[in-house]
Image: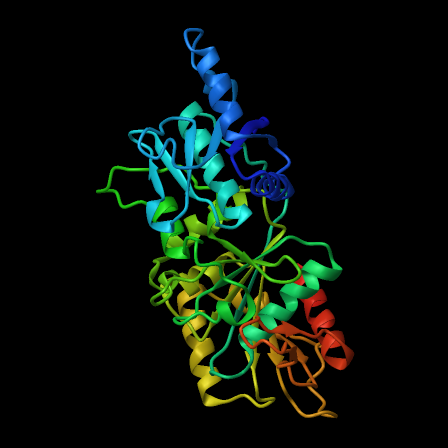
Amino acid sequence: MENITIVIVSGDREFSKALALSLMAVCDDFIIKTCDTKLFVSEWNAYKGEGDYTAKYDVVLWDGSEIEDTYRGNLVHLADKASQVKMDFNNQRFSIYKYCGAPAMGAAIFEIYSSLTGRSAVFVRKDKVGIFAFGSWEGGSGCTTVTLACAQELQRFRRKKILLLSLETVESTPRYFTVAPELKSVGEYLYRVLPDSSIIGETTTPFIESYIVRDLYGIEAFAPSRSLNPLTSLDGREMQKLIAVLVDSGRYDAILIDMGTCLTQSASAVMEMADRICFVTGSLDLTKREEMYLGHVLVSTGEDTMVKAVRLTNMCSAGTSPPSSDKKEAGETQFVALRTTARRFERTADFEEPNQFVLEGDFGEDIRRLTGLLLRH
């Protein structure tokens, strides 16, 4: 998308300067000017009779009550209260919460600009986007922890842009990501990219920034819904479309999907699409539950699933000797054992801060080994 010219009109010089810097930090496509409210109004009055003064800019962000009842088109009101936010695409009336985060405001500006001009971002799909699934036949095996640790390994040390998707019924995202209250949830994103055929409305792919949370290292995930995770209720076709939209965005190098113990249609679709699958267990020995789980996977996805699978024994005792993967029979899963607990993270004094993993020692080495296996397509 071409550069977007923005003017921030405010009587608070420090606020307008801080807002301009934060918006430019999240998007290089913004060209931003700040202007005092009185000066802008004076120039606007002097311009009357020569056309629309605000047309000099793509978007005018107005901080103040002067236009609270008259804003329209590219004249966007910065609302003091979240309840005053309006995104009326039919009547082209837009207001943005002035204290929302810069990524969310930047995404709203993109949506407004696209609505006003009919132009949209052009996505350049990357040649290869890795899709890696993590699942387990037992709760408490550390599936989520291993998924997040691999995501951190890929993001920090292999310079990959990572998106994490969770198929857990009750998501653990808030434990590891800071979720701002103004962000839209994954359910709202699904409403935009998977519209009901009976509903006439927006069918374009939304700007993802409004829906995304990040951890300390830049790993991204969707802001969770306030109720149960809507991803678990998707059928196979809907999950395939969602992943296709994310791949086509050109934003990510890899998508890591934490299936947990989920065996729904959406999980089956994920395993069919995945480049590699990591099955996480807490036991070296084959259990009856594992046999039943893998039997269901084979029936629902086919034998090819096991060819691309890695079986990982997590939290096993030091000194245990897992079966060697050097003599792996055709169709048999590779074996990896993490000899140390995967539940290694740092807590800050403020327990509202998200947990942070520590990729050090044996744990870090095992995660690197596992990540290497996953990348070996």
Q: Residue at position x 37%, y 31% from top? A: 67
Q: In which quadrant of the rendered view does residue 183 lie? A: bottom left
Up/down of 37 relative to 258, above or below = above
Residue 111 or 285: which is nearer the viewer?
A: 111
Up/down of 55 relative to 254, above or below = above
Q: Residue at position x 46%, y 16% from top? A: 53
Colour scheme employed for the rendering of this structure: rainbow
Up/down of 213 relative to 3, above or below = below
Q: In which quadrant of the rendered view does residue 123 lie? A: top right
Position of residue 58 in the picture relative to residue 191 (left or right): right
Asked whether residue 91 appears in the rendered view, the answer is yes
Which quadrant does the C terminus fall into? Answer: bottom right
Which quadrant does the N terminus fall into? Answer: top right
Up/down of 371 relative to 137, above or below = above
Could you tell me residue 255's position as x and y percent?
A: 56, 56
Asked whether residue 55 appears in the rendered view, the answer is no
- Number of marks present in the image shown: 0
Position of residue 349 in the picture relative to residue 352 (left or right): right
Q: Residue furthest left?
A: 198
Position of residue 106 in the picture relative to residue 196 (left or right): right
Could you tell me residue 37's position as x and y percent?
A: 50, 30
Residue 324 or 15: which is nearer the viewer?
A: 15
Could you tell me residue 221's position as x and y percent?
A: 52, 58
Residue 30 or 247: which is nearer the viewer?
A: 30
Q: Residue at position x 45%, y 7% from top? A: 50
Residue 187 or 302: which is nearer the viewer?
A: 187
Could you tell me residue 152's position as x and y percent?
A: 66, 65
